[in-house]
Image: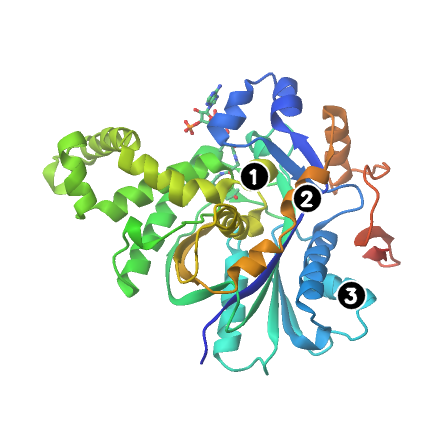
Amino acid sequence: MNSVGIDAVAIHAGKLKLDLVETFAPAMDEAPEKYTKGLGLHASSFPDVDEDIVTMGANAAHRLMDRKGLEPDDIGRIDVATESAFDNSKPVSTYIAGCLEQVYEGDFHHANKGERKFACISGTQSLDDAYNWIRAGRHRGRAALVIATDTALYARGDAGEATQGAGAVAMLVTEDPNLVELSPEQGFGSADETDFLKPNQQFPSVDGKRSVQVYLARMREALEDYESVAEPTHPDQFRYIPFHTPFPGMVRKAAMLGYRHMIRDSSIEDDLASEIGRQPRIEEFDDEEQFMDAVRDYMDDLKETEAYRGWYEGAIEPTLDIARHVGNWYTGSVHVARASALKRALEDDIDMTNEKLLVGSYGSGAQAEIHTETVREGWTEEIGALDIDDQLAARYDISYEEYEQVHDVHNHDKETDFEAFTTPESEFVLSGRGPMDERVYEYVE
Ligand code: CAA
């Protein structure tokens, strides 16, 4: 069988922008640096009044299909990953297929549709499902459409409010892909955790500080599990390392942990030994607390080395370019990080063909997954077709009062009636409710 992976990608950002520096920080009476330096965020993308997870997913999918010249018959599977679903029975993929059928002649009646849930990691799990379906030879030559779409909103006043975001990533999974080939090897770190959950409620209950620790613990397990089936990882193997990005500051912590792990027992650790010593080993300590203190000291020193800084600038920083201006997109976030890195490579004229990515996904609750990807020759064409910069520049910049209104509009418990801030053009919008209270969508020319 040929290689299997992501052939093409399209991104749709919520059409409103909340500026964290100019608008959110003053209203919260916080220093802007808490957001820009601490969390690493400058702005969040929000859905306009007539946008939701269906319109964002459908708009991304429509753009992808049009660009690739596809018809519904070419698609054998539509999987939607989301943790913002508003229907406990009818999957979002059926709503999106319904939207797309408004603009194509054919239909998706013979496509298998579903919805995947495991917090933010379900986007990657949906890629797995598509990959396995193709590898099993059940696809009849057709492609899978994987759509990760979320409105990542927190209750007003929650610490997570600064990390909100909304958008969708549509990915086409095929044999012999243009963009990246997925490795069959993968590693998991998975445990029953209550760091972030939504037990039949719209906004999450979050233990924010603990969620950070759970992310790191599961990611480390996943990396070790990956190495047990692949090979030991080393920083030089991977041009970029896209991580799930709830906010860039989280990735900064994960990157440091990953780097420390990857350089252990390598020539990089040897070379750094004269500057900062060798990494503490647990067997050299009487108790775990002393060991953890020594690890923290080592990491503080490691962070300041030229070797680490150079690696971070090259392998991690480019994955955060988009996230800094859109916030958390939950299921789409790691897929935005991949696109962001490849976009930077294109801008910097870096030849990525056959280069490797190490991809770290995470979902609260909790599970991390690590796999590798090999960049394919067609990547420049695919990444060159992204229009995310134009979308971000065209966003309507909301005031704090407008932010309060928009948050209420998307709050399922509130009845509000506000006009959209932007005018739709060649896109799907939420136009009302049907007789069974189902959401109704239309395509606006
Ligand atoms: N200048 C520079 N830095 C500043 C600063 C200033 N003036 N003020 C604060 N900071 C720094 C802090 O030192 C901190 O950095 P470190 O973590 O490196 O120490 C950072 O800014 C954030 O400050 P706080 O910790 O005080 O922020 P907070 O407590 O208000 O909120 C949070 C942080 C708990 C992560 C919160 O944003 C949150 O709950 N987010 C939602 C949960 C989340 O995203 N968790 C991530 C892991 S779970 C996951 O990944 C799944 C998912 O998508 C949700």
Query: How many residues crowd around disc 3 within 10 Å: few (fewer than 14), some, or many (20 or more)?
Result: some
Question: What is the spatial separation of the Cα atoms under label 1 and label 2, in whole angstroms?
Answer: 34 Å
Q: Which residue is mark 2?
A: 390
The response on whether ligand 1 sits within 8 Å of label 1 is no
Mark in front: 2 vs 3:
2
Q: Is residue 340 above or below residue 371?
A: above
Q: Is residue 93 visible to the viewer in this orientation of the structure?
A: yes
Q: Amino acid at mark 1?
A: Ser
Left of 323 or right of it: where is 295? left
Q: Which mark is residue 98?
A: 3
Is disc 3 placed on a helix, strand or loop? helix
Q: Is residue 279 left or right of residue 359?
A: left
The residue identified by callout 1 is: 205
Please tell me whether mark 1 or mark 2 is closer to you in this view. Answer: 2
Which amino acid lies under the numbered mark 2 shown in the image of this protein?
A: Asp
Question: How far across and how far down the image is residue 343, in percent?
Answer: 53, 49
Mark 1 or mark 2: which comes first in sequence? 1
For mark 1, give the secondary structure.
Answer: strand
| CB contact under 8 Å: marks 1 and 2 | no
Give whichever of discs 2 and 3 has the lower sequence position: 3
Q: Quadrant of residue 29 in the image? A: top right
- Residue found at x 85% / y 59%: 436
Determine the secondary structure under disc 2. Answer: helix
